[in-house]
Image: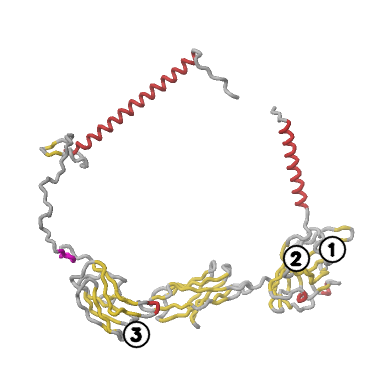
Amino acid sequence: MTVLHPFRRAAAVLAACAVLALGVVALVASQSQPARAASVGEFTLTPGSGSLSDPQPFSGSLRIPGACPDATIEDVNWNSVLTVFVVKADGTEARVQRGITNQAPYTAASSTVSLAAADNPGMGFDSLSSVITADGTYELRVRCVDNFSWDPAPEDIVPGDPYWSQKITVTGGDWVVGEGAKATSTELVAAPPVVEPGKEVTLTATTSPADAVGDVKFVEGDTTLGEASVADGKAEFKTTALAVGDHNIVARFTPTDATKFVSSESASFRVTVQPARYEIQDASGTRLADNPELERGQAVKLIVRRCQPSTSFALSMDRNDAGFPSATSDANGTVTWTGLTVPDDAVEGTSGWTLSPGCDAGGSEGTVTTVAFKVPAPPSGSPSATPTDEPTDDPTDDPTDEPTATSTDDTGGTTDGGGTTGGDSTTSGGGSGSGGSSGGGGLASTGSQIALFSGVGAVVLTAAGIAFVRYGRRNGLLTFGEPRS
């Protein structure tokens, strides 16, 4: 048996005592009851609204979802009288209705109690206006009090001290049950804010707080463009039906439950629908993609919009000297060139039609000076688009009599049909070019031999070691201590 050192034995006893003391403290704390406990549920008040100035604040009924403490000390008990308190803005409680005794004792799992004066002999009350002086949300508390003290002081101890709570919201001189509707805000954005006719625009409304539940209507004037439900604080609607022009759109949030949230409306957001600033069309009038690829000799139509009205514009082409006709913009600032032909000698790569003067729309749209396009590479066999003055068949400027094959003094190569092949170490493959790889084969063979000899040596040394140990133990040269327990 293991015996503890005296010092360790004393320490163990002290530790056990400490654990026991902590257990006693925890037990006492768990059995203790504060003078004022937390709410044990929510009571129901009927009717759910009234006036602060009513002499009797609550005259219908209330229901408590629990029992009062079933405790009696001599002739004092805490299960036969209820009192209603209001928690004021400073956190203190004020009694507003005391001496409620209908349906006592309150020892059942729930009780529905009449608040009529005739059903509660001796009941007293004060109007809510005596304790509530400002709009806001206030807490009501129903407490079990002893049958002699209907208005206990906060420091008085009530067994268990259960109370049930409810909220009322005061607006002006009236109150309603509940925390009241929360204010909301709604913001609207559109992407993109400027869109071409028939293109999709996404309207996104963001409501705050994010837990507000309801629907958003996207409205322009008296016209509803669409509607979407709010999810995680956002509602989204997509449309391609906006006509050309400016559209001032608002988002209107309508809550599902008006007692929880207030409706709200966003500021207007302007969406502008207008044709592209410029475009290139093919001979059939089909609009081409931005920066299209145009073949040499291809006929196209160029349209540039929102320029200076009634202005003449000259047209030229980048990296080409061909001449093109000028055109004059109409009263709306649209200038059109029809029958433009890409020159046959157009240089491959990025190019563009250049306007002079530039098309200035003013405002944020800026000035259009060039409408870009690309010219593909010429067909194979056609003359280069970038000719050079250098003849292609001129002799080299630096002739040499040296042979192109680089000779070497390495004699390790082999000959095949009189041609030296072993000198080029970069040549791979078999045949006469194997001289360079044969050296690598010799190195691999040497490595294999070294590995073989090393392995044999390791085996020999291991066997010799084992034999030596056995011989030493058999003849008493080596001894080992007893194994530790």
Question: Is-magenta flag for residue 384?
Answer: yes
Q: Position of residue 163 (x, y in %)?
A: 76, 63
Provide the residue designation for mark 1. 146
Residue 189 disc label: none
Question: Label 3 amino acid?
Answer: Asn
Q: Secondary structure at mark 2?
A: strand
Magenta span: predominant SS is: loop
Residue 431 visible, this orientation: no
Measuring 21% from the left and 40% from the top, which residue is drawn there? 425
Work out whether 146 lies above or below 228. above
Question: Is-magenta flag for residue 302?
Answer: no
Residue 332 disc label: 3
Q: Secondary structure at mark 1?
A: loop
Q: Secondary structure at mark 3?
A: loop
Residue nearest the viewer, comparing 384 with 52:
384
Q: Position of residue 36 (x, y in %)?
A: 77, 61
Quadrant of image for the N terminus: top right
Q: CA distance from mark 2 to mark 3?
A: 76 Å
Work out whether 166 lies above or below 473. below
Residue nearest the viewer, comparing 172 with 423:
423
Q: CA distance from mark 1 to mark 2?
A: 17 Å
Quadrant of image for the C terminus: top right
Mark sitting earlier along the chain (2/3): 2
Measuring 79% from the left and 72% from the top, which residue is drawn there? 96
Q: CA distance from mark 1 to mark 3?
A: 89 Å
Q: Position of residue 208 (x, y in %)?
A: 56, 70
Residue 230 visible, this orientation: yes
Q: Is residue 320 left or right of residue 165?
A: left
- Tell me the magenta residue range: 382-388
Provide the residue designation for mark 2. 64
Tell me the mark number nearer the camera, choosing from 1 and 3. Answer: 3
